[in-house]
Image (cartoon, rainbow, N blue to C red):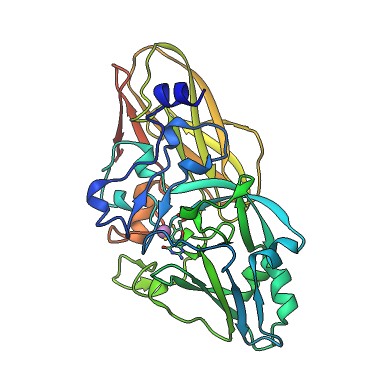
C-alpha cells in the first residue's frame, strides 16, 4: 500500500524555496496546499520554520518551568502534563511572513510558496490557564515570556489575558505525539496569533509585569509602515483566503465542470463568508463553506463553475464574524507600503489561461 502511494503521490511533499533558505538550520519548508483538501494538514506535510534547526529532546529529560511573578514556581515533567485534564482544539498556525515575498508584486508561482506557511492541526494538551492557576499569578503579573529549548532559545512576550483565554500547552498533533520538527515533546498553541509565538520545544514560562522586547519582537516581527515607522506587537493574523485549486501547481486539465476549492481563515474568530471572483474582483459570488467552521481555524470553501477555455482572473475574499473583509493588495499597500515582510493578507489573483495553465498575477 505505502509503496503504491509513494509512487503515484510522491510529489505531495513539503518544499523549500532555495534562495530563501540560507541553511538547514535557519530554514522554512512549505505545506503543499495545492494537493490537499478538507482542513486538516497531515503531520508529515506541515510546513516547518526553524530559527536554529530541530532540537532533539529526550521526553524523559523534558522539563517545563513556570516562575517569575508567581506564588509557587513549578516544574512539570512530560508525565505531569499528561496527567492533567486535557482538551482537543483544531487551529491554524500561520507564520507572520506567509505571503511576505509578494509585497512588491506577484513573485512565486504556486500557492505552496505564496500561502504555504500555514498548517491546520488538531492539538491535544493542557490549557495554559490551568498551569498558571496552579502556580498562582501574582496581581502584578501581566505578561509571560515563553522560551524554547532549541539553540536559538526563541522567546516571545505573551499578554497574560491571551494566555488565560485560549493558549494551550500541546503535546499531540492530529492524535500522535508532536513531530520533532513541530516542537516534540511540547509546544505552545496561541490560537489566531502569529506563528512565531507558538514556541516549540517549550521549556520556560516566566511571569512578568511588562513585555520583554526580545529580539523576535523588536528587530523581527515588527511591520515597517509607509511612513518609515515600525509597528510592534501585531499579534493577530487577520482574515485571509486562497484558492488552492486551480492554482499554478494544480492547472485545469479539462474543459467543462470545475470545482474551485480553497481555504479561508481568521485569527479573530470564525470565517462567516467567502466570495469568489472569476474576473479579477469586478463581480463576486458567494462560495459554499463545507465541513466544520471553527474558531481561529481554516475552513474549506468550494465554488462550482463551467469553464469553456476563456481566461479567468480567479480571486477569493474572506469575511469573519467581526465584520472584517479581506482587503485587496492595493488597499493593503496604501496603509502598509511595500517595505513590510509580515502580515500580507491581501487578495490573491490566479490567471487561468486558455490552455488551462494558471499563473500568479496582480490586477491593477
Ligand atoms: N523554539 C522555537 N519555536 C518556534 C520557532 C523556532 O525557530 N524555535 N519558529 C517559530 C516560527 S517563526 C513559526 S512560523 C512557527 C512554525 O511552526 P511549525 O514549524 O510547526 O510550522 O514556530 C515558531 N516557534
Ligand atoms: Mo514564522
Q: Observer-nearest residue: 38 or 55?
A: 55
Percent of width and height locating residue 292: 66, 38
Compared with residue 81, is residue 306 higher up or lower down, i.e. above or below? above
Q: Is residue 337 visible?
A: yes
Compared with residue 116, is residue 168 higher up or lower down, i.e. above or below? below
Q: Quadrant of residue 220?
A: bottom left
Q: Quadrant of residue 343?
A: bottom left
Q: How many marks overall? A: 0
Q: Residue at x 75, y 64 (%)?
A: 84
Percent of width and height locating residue 331: 38, 51
Q: Residue at x 50, y 29 (%)?
A: 261
Is residue 291 found left or right of 249 in the rendered image? right
Q: Quadrant of residue 14?
A: top left
Compared with residue 130, is residue 36 higher up or lower down, i.e. above or below? above
Percent of width and height locating residue 208: 58, 85
Percent of width and height locating residue 353: 29, 22
Is residue 218 found left or right of 339 in the rendered image? right
Q: Observer-nearest residue: 317 or 150?
A: 150
The image quadrant where one finds the C terminus is top left
Q: Is residue 315 visible?
A: no
Image quarter for ligand 1 equals bottom left
**Residue ranking furthest to the right:** 85
Q: Residue at x 44, y 30 (%)?
A: 35
Q: Observer-nearest residue: 164 or 321?
A: 164
Amino acid at each position: 500500500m505505502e509503496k503504491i502511494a509513494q509512487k503515484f503521490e510522491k510529489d505531495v511533499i513539503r518544499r523549500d524555496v532555495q534562495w530563501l533558505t540560507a541553511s538547514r538550520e535557519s530554514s522554512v519548508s512549505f505545506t503543499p496546499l495545492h494537493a490537499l483538501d478538507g482542513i486538516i494538514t497531515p503531520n508529515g506535510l506541515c510546513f516547518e520554520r526553524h530559527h536554529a534547526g530541530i532540537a532533539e529532546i529526550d521526553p524523559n529529560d523534558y522539563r517545563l518551568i513556570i516562575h517569575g511573578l508567581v506564588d509557587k514556581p513549578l516544574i512539570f515533567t512530560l508525565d505531569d502534563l499528561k496527567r492533567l485534564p486535557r482538551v482537543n482544539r483544531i487551529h491554524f498556525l500561520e507564520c507572520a511572513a506567509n505571503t511576505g515575498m509578494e509585497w512588491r508584486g506577484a513573485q512565486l508561482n504556486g500557492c505552496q510558496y505564496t500561502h504555504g506557511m500555514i498548517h491546520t492541526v488538531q492539538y491535544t494538551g493542557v490549557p495554559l490557564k490551568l498551569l498558571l492557576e496552579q502556580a498562582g499569578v501574582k496581581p502584578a503579573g501581566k505578561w509571560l515570556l515563553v522560551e524554547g529549548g532549541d539553540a536559538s532559545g526563541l522567546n516571545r512576550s505573551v499578554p497574560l489575558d491571551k494566555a488565560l483565554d485560549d493558549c494551550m500547552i500541546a503535546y499531540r498533533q492530529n492524535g500522535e505525539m508532536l513531530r520533532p520538527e513541530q516542537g516534540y515533546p511540547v509546544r505552545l498553541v496561541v490560537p489566531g496569533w502569529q506563528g512565531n509565538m507558538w514556541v516549540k520545544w517549550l521549556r520556560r514560562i516566566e511571569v512578568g509585569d511588562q513585555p520583554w522586547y526580545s529580539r523576535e519582537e523588536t528587530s523581527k516581527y515588527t511591520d515597517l509602515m509607509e511612513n518609515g515607522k515600525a509597528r510592534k506587537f501585531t499579534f493577530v493574523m487577520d482574515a485571509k483566503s486562497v484558492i488552492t485549486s486551480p492554482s499554478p501547481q494544480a492547472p485545469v486539465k479539462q474543459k467543462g465542470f470545475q470545482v474551485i476549492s480553497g481555504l479561508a481563515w481568521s485569527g479573530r474568530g470564525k470565517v462567516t463568508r467567502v466570495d469568489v471572483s472569476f474576473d479579477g474582483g469586478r463581480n463576486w459570488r458567494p462560495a459554499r463553506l463545507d465541513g466544520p467552521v471553527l474558531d481561529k481555524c481554516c475552513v474549506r470553501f468550494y465554488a462550482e463553475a463551467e469553464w469553456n477555455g476563456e481566461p479567468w482572473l480567479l480571486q477569493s475574499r474572506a469575511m469573519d464574524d467581526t465584520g472584517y473583509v479581506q482587503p485587496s493588495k492595493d488597499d493593503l499597500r496604501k496603509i502598509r507600503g511595500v517595505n513590510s515582510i509580515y502580515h500580507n493578507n491581501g487578495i490573491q489573483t490566479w490567471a487561468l489561461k486558455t490552455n488551462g495553465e494558471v499563473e500568479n498575477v496582480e490586477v491593477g
